[in-house]
Amino acid sequence: MENRRSFFHLHLISDSTGETLISAGRAASVQFHASQPIEHVYPLVRNRKQLLPVLEAIDRSPGIVLYTVVDRELADIIDERCREMGVPCANVLEPVMTLFQTYLGTASRRRVGAQHVMNADYFARIEALNYTMDHDDGQTPDDYNDADVVIVGISRTSKTPTSIYLANRGIKTANIPIVHGVPLPESLLTATKPLIVGLIATTDRISQVRENRVLGTATSFNGDEYTDRATIAEELKYARLLCARHNWPLIDVTRRSIEETAAAIVALRPKLR
């Protein structure tokens, strides 16, 4: 018999953008495969007037309530109204803040949106994102020595999403496709600053991903060779030899998420500086 997923309402109330809540809610809900959340996100809730319609919406569609509201009065209102409605709620940041306060011996400033202050780290991320977008898929090949990381790999090894994820952490990342018989840019081979990493995957995995891509491509595109397993095996062999020749580390992304691949690259950086 086919397994059917049930649905539940997940209400996310934030006095900022809601990004922290969305990540926390999804990280928790993904552990419950039989239940699918219906997300209701309420960002920038900072006073009673903004909070009242949110509470009315929760009353109409009861479910789990998660919130990140630093204003104690608003937090108390949410807790009280959720008790009255009989719905579970949790202040996601409160246990973490309590832990920090206990260890550091000082109270937090409870500043709304403090994680989004435009400080040096913020501008470093913007600079890294701009660099990464300009150097996606082998574009602008003249200044690879300005990169922190350069990712190489054959088509469909998650080079671009991994690069963007790293850029969001302030790491300037370029990525270059490895194409059998096409030499890599000389500016890459002479670069001394960046960590250069090769991404690979199994033949079956790459073929599967490429087949999905072909399905969404115009009918004029001939994908037979692109998805052919023998051709992919040759591409991977060439990529392995290329990375071995230049002593570039390889990461197999077959069973890794983008986050796990990025973490593996970050772990390599201090060792190879």
Image (spheres, grey):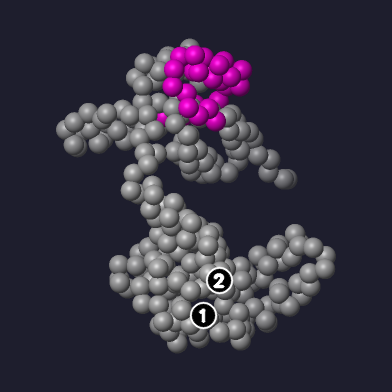
User: Secondary structure beneath disc 1?
Assistant: loop
Give percent across and percent down for residue 233: 62, 81
Give percent across and percent down for residue 129: 47, 55
| Quadrant containing the C terminus in the rendered view | bottom left
Which badge, 1 or 2, comes first in the chain's sequence?
A: 2
> Which of these two is toward me, 129 or 43?
129
Identify the disc placed on residue 185: 1
Gap in Å between the C-alphas at discs 1 and 2?
9 Å
- Residue drawn at point x = 46 percent, y = 14 percent: 48
Magenta region includes residue 138: no
User: Secondary structure beneath disc 2?
Assistant: helix
- Residue drawn at point x = 27 percent, y = 29 percent: 109
> Which of these two is toward me, 103 or 181?
181
Please name the amino acid that badge 1 sits on: Pro
> Which of these two is toward me, 124 or 167?
124
Label 1 with label 2: CB-CB less than 8 Å = yes
Side of 91 relative to 225 (left or right): left
Side of 11 relative to 110 (left or right): right
Q: Is residue 241 above or below residue 144?
A: below
The magenta stretch spans which residues?
41-68
Give percent across and percent down for residue 12: 50, 30
Residue carrying label 2: 138
Please name the amino acid that badge 2 sits on: Gly
Hey, which quadrant is residue 189 in on the image? bottom left
- Residue drawn at point x = 19 percent, y = 37 percent: 103
